[in-house]
Image (tube, helix red, strand yellow):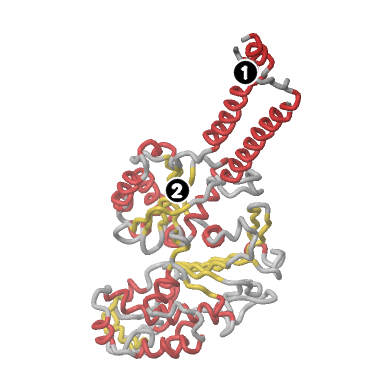
């Protein structure tokens, strides 16, 4: 019995100290791994929101944007989660009844109130940006413009969001923010890739924006915008042509054809068989056409379609000035434009018109596109109505003109050739977000695109936890090996004496 007691006393595995050390070591390692996993596990994602109202010339649209709330400086990826088209015309159409402009926004704002979580309402910024329609109204009647904005502001402040005001965007801002949107959604800015140019066409204006290696901003500084985004500098060429949106361009083209005040205007941009009685005073209403009104004209005229693409294109060219240019090169109306460079995204009315005409595929040769449009314009009006019974007649009647205008603007105005036409991509959305200026506008106002790339962890969460776990296991194995290495030093246990 004394030998057994001596053996137990000399065996370190059976001493309380070694048992405690071993247990504590195991517990410490398990705790290390557990804490690392729990501390670094992905949290339930929380989001922040922003709302932008695009008050265009023909209509207003509301967009809701969402991004991860946990990101430093709110630099998480922003995505559009909802859009709502306001019923009725653009807010500039309510000049004589401004209160109705504010009331028209109510339904879409109520949708936003339901879709944005209640606890985020007070911190959700709400912006309204007005474009060319309000620019024209402000030129024509600044007092009426102010009253519309006052009514819109009063209506928006009744909702529980953080209202940041309503204002008119300059044409340069509209073009630049459209460029930011397209390149942000395509991840070109963060990755420092070649950027995509932006072509925007609305009802009252059109914008072209792109980066060109041949342009440093010195020849025409007013068309230059400089951005520093994600550590990269961009010298952007951008220009907005007021009155050259498709609706105002149609007015200008028709006004040019009717400048002599005839009783009947034979229009090659409308289908053969189309006829309508129109009012001269309405045709020449607005600053884009008011200076072209004939002195002696009847109250009305008969608008008759001829359906001839080539003649329509010549009529469209009459509203451009291609002769005057004081710079090394121009687009039209004496406006400087550097050499086109890179791919382009064409959105807004560009997309909607060309999509209706089934001409969004720019891999099709330009001449084939023109031939297709020739056939479409020559199609009798009664056949067009039968083919598209669900489209409003006003819009349906204008597609021949709109398609011809787009091709003329791109090739004659912006100097796209048969070769470079294939660089254009007609787009509606990029990764579920609408292409347009609204996202770029919000990103700029909320400083959500940093000038420098934000710091990021050297390892992703999964990689970090995996490495930590491997190290912990290695520590445990080394600990066991250390204990086992002491075994030769343990006293040899003699056999138990036999009890006789």
Image quadrant in which the C terminus is located = top right
Q: Residues within 10 Å of mark 1 (few under 14, many from 20)?
A: few
* Label ID, residue 14: 1
Q: Is residue 60 above or below residue 308?
A: above
Q: Which residue: 49% across, 51% down? A: 78
For residue 166, above or below residue 425:
above
The furthest residue to the right: 489
Front of the two marks 1 and 2: 1
Q: Is 172 displayed left or right of 107 in the figure?
A: right
Please rate how many residues cluster around mark 2, counting C-alpha atoms within 10 Å: few if below 14, some from 14 to 19, many from 20: many
Q: Is residue 385 visible?
A: yes
Give percent across and percent down for residue 212. 66, 68
Residue nearest the observer in this picture, 474 or 241: 474
Residue 195 in picture, x, y percent from top left: 61, 65
**Which quadrant of the view contains residue 283?**
bottom left
In percent of the image, x 63 and y 58: which residue is there? 191
Residue that badge 2 annotates: 66
Percent position (x, y) of residue 39? 54, 33
Circle 2 sits in a helix, a strand or a loop, which is it? strand
> Horizontally, is 211 left or right of 294 in the view?
right
User: Residue 202 falls in which quadrant of the image?
Assistant: bottom left
Contact? badges 1 and 2 (CB < 8 Å): no
Secondary-structure class at tag 1? helix
Give the mark, 1 or 2, whose residue is nearer the N terminus.
1
Quick one: which residue is furthest to the top in this view?
2
Give x and y (percent) for residue 10: 69, 15
On the picture, is 291 further left or further right than 227? left
Quadrant of the image occupied by residue 247: bottom left
Q: Where 130 falls versus 491 (above or below)?
A: below
């Amino acid at each position: 019995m004394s030998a057994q007691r001596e053996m137990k006393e000399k065996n370190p595995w059976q001493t309380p100290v070694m048992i405690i050390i071993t247990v504590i070591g195991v517990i410490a390692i398990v705790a290390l791994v557990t804490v690392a996993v729990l501390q670094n596990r992905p949290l339930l994602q929380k989001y922040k929101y922003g709302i932008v109202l695009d008050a265009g010339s023909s209509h207003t649209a509301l967009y809701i944007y969402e991004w991860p709330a946990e990101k430093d400086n709110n630099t998480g990826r922003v995505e559009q989660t909802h859009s709502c088209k306001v019923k009725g015309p653009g807010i500039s159409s309510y000049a004589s009844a401004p209160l109705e402009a504010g009331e028209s926004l109510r339904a879409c704002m109520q949708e936003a109130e339901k879709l944005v979580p209640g606890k985020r309402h007070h911190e959700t910024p709400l912006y309204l940006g007005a474009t060319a329609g309000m620019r024209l109204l402000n030129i024509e009647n600044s007092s009426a413009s102010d009253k519309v904005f006052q009514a819109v502001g009063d209506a928006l402040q009744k909702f529980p969001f953080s209202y940041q005001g309503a204002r008119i965007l300059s044409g340069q801002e509209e073009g630049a923010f459209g460029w930011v949107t397209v390149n942000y959604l395509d991840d070109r800015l963060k990755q420092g890739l070649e950027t995509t140019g932006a072509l925007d066409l609305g009802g009252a204006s059109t914008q072209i924006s792109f980066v060109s290696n041949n342009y440093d901003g010195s020849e025409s500084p007013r068309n230059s915008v400089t951005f520093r985004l994600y550590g990269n500098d961009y010298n952007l060429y951008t220009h907005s042509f007021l009155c050259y949106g498709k609706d105002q361009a149609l007015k200008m083209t028709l006004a040019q054809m009717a400048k002599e005040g005839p009783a009947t205007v034979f229009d090659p941009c409308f289908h053969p068989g189309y006829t309508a009685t129109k009012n001269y005073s309405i045709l020449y209403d607005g600053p884009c056409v008011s200076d072209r009104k004939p002195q002696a004209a009847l109250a009305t005229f008969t608008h008759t379609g001829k359906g001839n693409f080539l003649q329509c294109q010549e009529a469209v060219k009459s509203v451009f000035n291609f002769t005057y240019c004081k710079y090394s090169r121009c687009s039209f109306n004496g406006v400087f434009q550097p050499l086109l460079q890179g791919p382009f995204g064409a959105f807004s009315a560009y997309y909607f018109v060309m999509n209706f005409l089934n001409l969004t595929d720019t891999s099709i040769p330009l001449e084939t596109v023109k031939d297709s449009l020739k056939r479409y314009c020559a199609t009798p009006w009664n056949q067009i109505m039968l083919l598209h019974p669900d489209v409003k007649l006003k819009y349906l009647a204008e597609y021949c003109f709109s398609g011809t205008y787009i091709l003329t603007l791109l090739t004659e105005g912006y100097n796209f050739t048969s070769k470079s036409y294939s660089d254009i991509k007609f787009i509606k959305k990029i990764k579920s977000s609408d292409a347009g200026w609204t996202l770029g506008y919000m990103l700029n106002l909320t400083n959500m695109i940093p000038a420098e790339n934000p710091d990021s962890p050297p390892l992703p969460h999964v990689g970090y936890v995996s490495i930590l776990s491997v190290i912990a296991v290695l520590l445990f194995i080394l600990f066991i090996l250390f204990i086992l290495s002491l075994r030769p030093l343990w006293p040899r246990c003699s056999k138990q004496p036999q009890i006789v």
